[in-house]
Amino acid sequence: MIGPNLSDWALKHRSFIVFAMLAITIAGITSYYGLGRSEDPAFTFRTMVVQAAWPGATLDDTLNQVTERLERKLQETNELDYLRSYTGPGLTTIFVNLKGSTSPSEVPDIWYQVRKNIGDIQRTLPSGVVGPGFNGDFGDTYGLIYGFTADGFTHRELRDHIEDIRSRLLQVPDVSKIEILGAQDEHIFVEFSTQVLAGLGIDRAALVAALQAQNAVIPAGSLVTGDEKISIRVTGAFRSENDLLDVNFLSNGQLIRLRDIGEVRRTLADPPQPMFRVNGKPAIGLAIAMREGGGAADELCRSRTAAAGRAA
């Protein structure tokens, strides 16, 4: 016979073989229960974006007075691998990349230190700099995305209903974040005819100032009684675009109503924000992210979303 006789050796060392089989079995069972089974497994991105704007600044000014100052401070970050920055006139974007060996449990503390360190030098940045802002939420996995359409309803009505659904779903255990996709902002335009304004001798700046003063939020005082403190509020705030038409203002000794010289209309923002469609139809979506280990709440989210859709 060529080579060792394993069968003979195993029969002579039965105790060791039994022990090895038990150890391998226990290790296999332990490994099985430790396998990743999440539908949306959690993972950590070791990158943060730091962005600041300086409206009106040139490329050289932005580079020398904003980007370089931020980079010098960011170089003090623990576990830093490298920085990558992009600078344009009035805008700087810096990517902070940590080493791949950084433990996921250490990443939140490092990002806190980044925010703190930049906050320490924020007052030294040039006047007029907006930010810096931070974005480190790259690890959210949106495993559930629902699309909503509604025939016969305006975009605003559909959005209001979806906002209500979002509030309900945030009460579901293990739901960490819900983003609304495809919702469009609305703008209210007040349009005047330059010929009418010139014919009536109306100062456009005075007209705009009157509109701003009408909708200003200012303290009006309070009334203190024996047991109560009652806040006093001035009425007249705009509740809809139609309220703008009833604004009166004084020009050249004449009291003029806005509806007599202009038009007010509500439209969606142009250019539009990123669109969301379902089967080619404009829609609004809800993207739901779960906490780590919260995959069991998926079915509850589905049932509540379906119930809210039927209620609509």
Image (cartoon, helix red, strand yellow):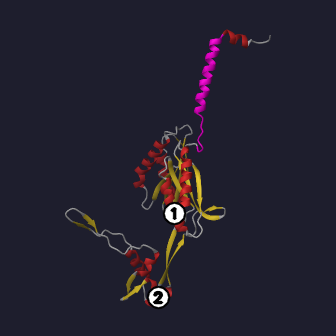
Q: How crowded is mark 2: few (under 14 residues within 10 Å), some or many (20 or more)?
A: few
Residue 85 seen by the camera? no
Residue 54's place in the image compared with 4, above or below, is below
Left or right position of 13 against 235: right
x and y percentages locating residue 61 in the rendered image: 50, 59
Is residue 32 within the magenta segment? yes
Per the image, label 2 sits on a secondary structure element best described as helix
Q: Residue drawn at (59%, 56%), measured in percent from left and top?
A: 146
Give the residue at mark 1. 161
SS class, disc 1: helix
**Image: magenta residue range:** 13-40
Is residue 212 toward the left or the right of residue 71 in the image? left
User: Mark 2 and mark 1: span between their CA atoms?
Assistant: 44 Å
* Magenta part, dominant SS: helix
Q: Residues within 10 Å of mark 1 (few under 14, many from 20)?
A: some
Q: Hey, what amino acid is under mark 2?
A: Ala
Judging depth in this view, the residue of 258 and 17 nearest the camera is 17
Q: Which of marks 2 and 1 is in front?
A: 1
Determine which of the numbered discs, if any, sits on residue 175 in the image. Answer: none
- On screen, residue 74 above or below 260: above
Q: Position of residue 206 (x, y in %)?
A: 40, 81
* Front residue of this view, candidates 221 and 80: 221
Q: Which residue is drawn at 47% across and 45% down?
A: 111
Location of mark 2 (residue) = 198
